[in-house]
Amino acid sequence: MEQFTAFSDMEKRRLDDLVSRNQIDHAPKEDIIGDGEHSANCHVVLSGLACRYKILPDGRRQIMAFLIPGDLCDAEIFVLKVMDHGVSAIVPTRTALVSGEDMKGLLRETSSLGEALWWGTMTDLGVLRERIIDHGRRTAYVRTAHLLYELLVRYRMVELAKDNRFGFPITQTDLADATGLTPVHANRTLKRLKADGLVDFSGGVVAVLDAPRLKEAAQFSGEYLHLDRAHDRQAVGQRAGDLV
């Protein structure tokens, strides 16, 4: 959230206190919050990996976004009676539950949190728009490269990528559901990216071997991540901004 605005020491302490009060562990494939459900709490991913998804009437799943540590799962619960999609853990995932009343109270006390939530929501919408472009105009190769490069940037933002490596322990089915491909086609596309010397995969870790070439292959432009909003541009540049 501090990518978008600066917090005072008091605000940092309040946020740290809120996320430390009530934490819950989720097993792989377990819903953090289900489609059509309401929750009195907001969920913040602390560790692991989750996804936003929708199940079609014929049982197929579409993954709309991956949620990494630091991401809010359901900030929109403030304005929705029920969720219009589900959020599920992909691997063992821990979330912090922040009560809606606590969040509302904090929002009334400080404009910084409200600004950060607003810009974070704009980034979520930007990611969703990129997925629409993926399915409408990008080839399987480009959309897969784009997703992997975007994740590299996002993991760098939260200091969870080292030497352009980050944990991304998904299955071929997960990747297929996120890219709109069949598992066979998704696997074939990953093999092409690997054969081209752009990425490697081992033990649930993605290694980006040539970030500039992967960015070019992805036709990536990172304005939708709003890194220019960062209050500490030097630190963000060291972590992620230099990739955009």
Image (tube, rainbow, N blue to C red):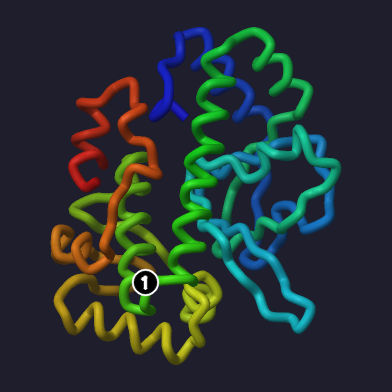
Q: Is 61 drawn above or below residue 233 in the view shown?
A: below
Residue 34 left/right relative to 88? right
Q: Is any part of residue 29 visible from this angle?
A: yes
Q: Residues within 10 Å of mark 1 (few under 14, many from 20)?
A: many
Residue 238 image point, x, y percent: 19, 35
Q: Secondary structure at mark 1?
A: helix
**Residue shown at 65%/74% (left/top)?**
61
Res. 194 image quadrant? bottom left
Residue 46 left/right relative to 58? left
Residue sitting nearer the eye, 33 or 148:
148
Residue sitting nearer the eye, 28 or 172:
172
**Residue shown at 31%/31% (left/top)?**
228
Total marks drawn?
1
Q: Is 76 drawn above or below residue 107 in the view shown?
A: below
Residue 151 image point, x, y percent: 37, 55
**Residue shown at 34%/27% (left/top)?**
230
Residue sitting nearer the eye, 176 or 159:
176
Residue sitting nearer the eye, 77 or 136:
136
Residue 141 image point, x, y percent: 32, 78
Give the residue type at disc 1: Thr
Q: Is 83 drawn above or below residue 96 in the view shown?
A: below
Q: Residue reaching furthest bottom?
A: 184
